Image: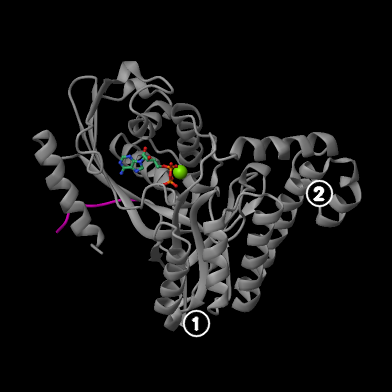
């Protein structure tokens, strides 16, 4: 894996090849894994993500005119050209919207200049590791520096979320952008999605001889929007019928008392959200006590809740989780939106090869597409990369 400096010099030379001049700024932002707290960011819940070592890097050079050119190392045939005056939600090539949307979401963006933009994303695309937030946050971090916008991290998170919600048209919560911007090495970030208050929670697993294995199931069972809209609607219905501001405002015990009036499906959706919020806080307590057995148990409970109550898992994710647990994982669960994407397993460092092999053969036996594996310790959030020495 290349370090920051060689990554920066790679993209500088790619940029010069593509545009014939050197960039004015290079920045990077990481993907993320959410340790626990799934599908509750939009219910004002707590989440506990950490930034991974894989990053998206962007190089930007100002132009004298109003032209915007967006190129991606991952889309060599698709350079996209438009003008600062033509930015409008849901226009442009779908992939370029992630970049243009960030520009559009910047207050007074018409006062910026034209730009050449090159991105190089090393976060696996569509694997549930949030390559989209990595892309948005790398661009936002670069623009903030280049135009000296002085936008703070909370506002950058809101701005990049708006870009994805409105310009790209994906109704994501605030978690992915927040952790990509605010991640810290050796820590997970307890993020209160209600007010974006954050607290760093030590997540040092290497010294415990543990690894966090990320398993990309390579499955993508997208309904039109992955069933996401239905889950959000169910939570909103529960909130309306319970007469509370959000699912944050009811305890597990209260939900079981007051939830009798809800239909069965709405109750199950609310039950996932409310119990998951408690599991996040319990996970924080466990981490603070370095109690990784309890953490593992909470991961297993989170998976069962996502599988049975929120029904966003799928056969591939269940197989990955069950196999990891059978091979001795302390805990495992699906992560991300669901219906495919990735799972995580907390395992002993010396079992990594065995767990990977067991999952690969379990997938092969079912004729599933071969899974991909990653490991990552908690890493730093977005930053501007200085010139190599
Ligand atoms: P995830 O965020 O889980 O990786 P998404 O579907 O939200 O999956 O985002 C992936 C999309 O983001 C890609 O299909 C593409 O449109 C865009 N994208 C992310 N990184 C890049 C990149 N390096 N180059 C071009 N497009 C990218
Ligand atoms: Mg995404």
Q: Which of 215 and 248 is in front in this view?
A: 215
**Label ID, residue 208:** 1
Q: Is residue 85 visible?
A: yes
Q: In which quarter of the image is residue 103?
A: top left
**Label 2 packing within 10 angstroms: few (<14), some (14-19), many (20+):** some
Question: Which quarter of the image is occupied by the N terminus?
Answer: bottom left
Please tell me which residue is depicted at 9% across the width and 40% down the height of the picture: 17
The stretch of residues the image draws in magenta is 383-389
Task: Give the secondary structure at mark 2.
Answer: loop
Q: Colour mode?
A: one colour
Q: Is residue 357 above or below residue 339?
A: below
* Magenta portion: prevailing SS class: loop
**Label 1 packing within 10 angstroms: few (<14), some (14-19), many (20+):** few
The first of marks 2 and 1 along the sequence is: 1
Is residue 233 rendered to the left or right of residue 109?
Answer: right
Is residue 191 rendered to the left or right of residue 118?
Answer: right
Task: Give the secondary structure at mark 1.
Answer: helix
Between marks 2 and 1, how big is the CA–CA gap? Answer: 36 Å
Q: Position of residue 38 (x, y in %)?
A: 61, 53
Is 385 included in the stretch rendered in magenta? yes
Residue occupied by mark 2:
250
Please tell me which residue is depicted at 64% across the width and 67% down the height of the picture: 300
The image quadrant in which ligand 1 is located: top left
Is residue 49 rendered to the left or right of residue 256?
Answer: left
């Amino acid at each position: 894996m290349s370090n920051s400096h060689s990554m920066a010099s790679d993209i500088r030379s790619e940029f010069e090849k593509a545009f014939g001049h050197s960039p004015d700024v290079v920045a990077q932002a990481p993907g993320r894994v959410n340790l626990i707290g799934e599908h509750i960011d939009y219910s004002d819940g707590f989440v506990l993500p950490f930034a991974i070592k894989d990053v998206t890097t962007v190089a930007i050079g100002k132009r004298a005119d109003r032209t915007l050119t967006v190129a991606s190392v991952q889309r060599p045939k698709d350079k996209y050209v438009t003008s600062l005056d033509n930015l409008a939600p849901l226009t442009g090539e779908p992939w370029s919207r992630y970049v243009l949307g960030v520009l559009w979401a910047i207050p007074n963006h018409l006062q910026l200049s034209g730009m050449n933009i090159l991105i190089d994303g090393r976060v696996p695309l569509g694997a549930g590791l949030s390559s989209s937030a990595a892309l948005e946050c790398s661009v936002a971090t670069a623009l903030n520096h280049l135009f000296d916008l002085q936008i703070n991290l909370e506002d950058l998170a809101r701005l990049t979320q708006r870009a994805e919600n409105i310009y790209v048209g994906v109704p994501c919560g605030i978690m992915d952008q927040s952790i990509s911007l605010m991640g810290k090495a050796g820590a997970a970030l307890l993020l209160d999605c209600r007010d974006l208050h954050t607290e760093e929670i030590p997540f040092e697993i290497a010294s415990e001889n543990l690894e966090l294995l990320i398993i990309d199931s390579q499955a993508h069972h997208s309904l039109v929007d992955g069933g996401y809209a239905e889950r959000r609607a169910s939570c909103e219905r529960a909130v309306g019928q319970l007469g509370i501001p959000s699912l944050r405002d009811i305890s597990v015990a209260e939900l079981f008392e007051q939830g009798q009036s809800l239909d069965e499906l709405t109750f199950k959706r609310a039950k996932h959200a409310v119990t998951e919020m408690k599991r996040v806080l319990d996970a924080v307590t466990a981490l603070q006590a370095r109690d990784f057995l309890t953490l593992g148990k909470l991961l297993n409970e989170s998976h069962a809740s996502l599988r049975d109550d929120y029904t966003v898992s799928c056969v591939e994710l269940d197989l990955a989780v069950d196999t990891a647990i059978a091979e001795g994982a302390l805990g495992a669960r699906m992560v991300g939106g669901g219906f495919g994407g990735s799972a995580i397993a907390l395992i002993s460092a010396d079992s990594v090869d065995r767990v990977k092999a067991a999952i690969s053969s379990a997938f092969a036996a079912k004729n599933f597409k071969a899974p991909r594996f990653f490991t990552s310790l908690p890493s730093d959030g977005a930053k501007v990369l200085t010139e190599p020495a």
